[in-house]
Structure formats: structure tokens, C-alpha cells
Image: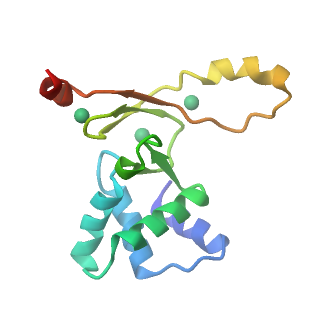
Amino acid sequence: MKEAEILQQIKARGFKITPQRRAIIAALLVPDKPPTAKDVLEIVRNKYPDVGLDTVYRNLNLLADIGCVIQINLKNSEKSRFEILKNHHHHLICLGCGEAVCLEKCMLEKHTGVLKDKGYQIVGHAFEIYGYCPSCRGEAG
Ligand SMILES: [Zn+2]
Ligand SMILES: [Zn+2]
Ligand SMILES: [Zn+2]
């Protein structure tokens, strides 16, 4: 999603677009890897030194609720990362440092057909793979 689309969604849902909110969205669009709330805070604080982590979390949760951002690393909320919604994909997550690697392809889409007989209309799914990245593997021995 582009910044303009996100701002439109926020307005459409009846929320205000504050300068801080804009800065948080802009911060999410910067890194090449999905940032944590603390990463976002660091970027936002360059411009708005008064913004606190609570504000960042509140805004990230709002963006997730309205479907503009996905939360990554559901297993460890402290190390959760937030990513602007793009094409559907999944993540490989390091249990050591919390790094999240985007996986290009969805391995589940072709399998959701087996759920048809449960009577559900499937609208989406979440799937994360946990492990240790090369540098964390080194530390563990
Ligand atoms: Zn790691
Ligand atoms: Zn991703
Ligand atoms: Zn998928």
C-alpha cells in the first residue's frame, strides 16, 4: 500500500490524520526490512521528540485493525515487527534476535481447498516459520 492509500483508509474509518500518525506511517515505509515498534519510534523521534512508545503501539495497532499493516512475530509480541500490507506472503522469524525475513511465495494457498468440507468461507490465513538466523546460530554454538 502507498502512503496516500493508507491515509485514505484512516479517513474512511473516521480517524484523524495527525502529524505524528503521518510520521509513523512514513517510518514504516522507510526500512527494507519490517521494523519493530522501537525502530519506528527511533525514526519518528527525529522529527517529533515527544512521541512515546505507547503512541507508536497505539497507532500500529490501529493500522493493523484497519488492515493497512500486518503484525509479524505473533509468538513474541515484544519483538513483533510491523509491515505495510503488500502482496500476500509469509515470514521466517529468528527466535534469537527477532529478525523477520519475507518469503516470496505462499505455501498454503493451494492447500486451503482441503478446508472446503468444514463449511467455512476462507478469507485469509497467517503462517510463520520460526528458527535461528545464521548469526544467532553462531552464538548458540
Ligand atoms: Zn537471529
Ligand atoms: Zn514481509
Ligand atoms: Zn499464505
The correct choice, above or below, for 24 with respect to 79 in the image is below
- Quarter containing the C terminus: top left
Quadrant position of residue 140: top left
- Residues 97 and 106: in front is 97
- Residues 24 and 130: in front is 130
Residue 130 picture location, percent across and down: 39, 28
The correct choice, above or below, for 53 with respect to 84 in the image is below
Residue at the front extreme, as displayed: 140
Residue name at image x 74 percent, y 34 percent: 122
The correct choice, above or below, for 85 with respect to 109 in the image is below
Residue 117 picture location, percent across and down: 84, 20
Q: Quadrant location of ligand 3?
A: top right
Left or right: residue 6 compared with residue 22: right
Residue name at image x 69 percent, y 23 percent: 112
Left or right: residue 6 compared with residue 113: left
Quadrant position of residue 100: top left
Left or right: residue 29 compared with residue 135: right
Residue name at image x 80 percent, y 34 percent: 121
Residue 88 picture location, percent across and down: 54, 37
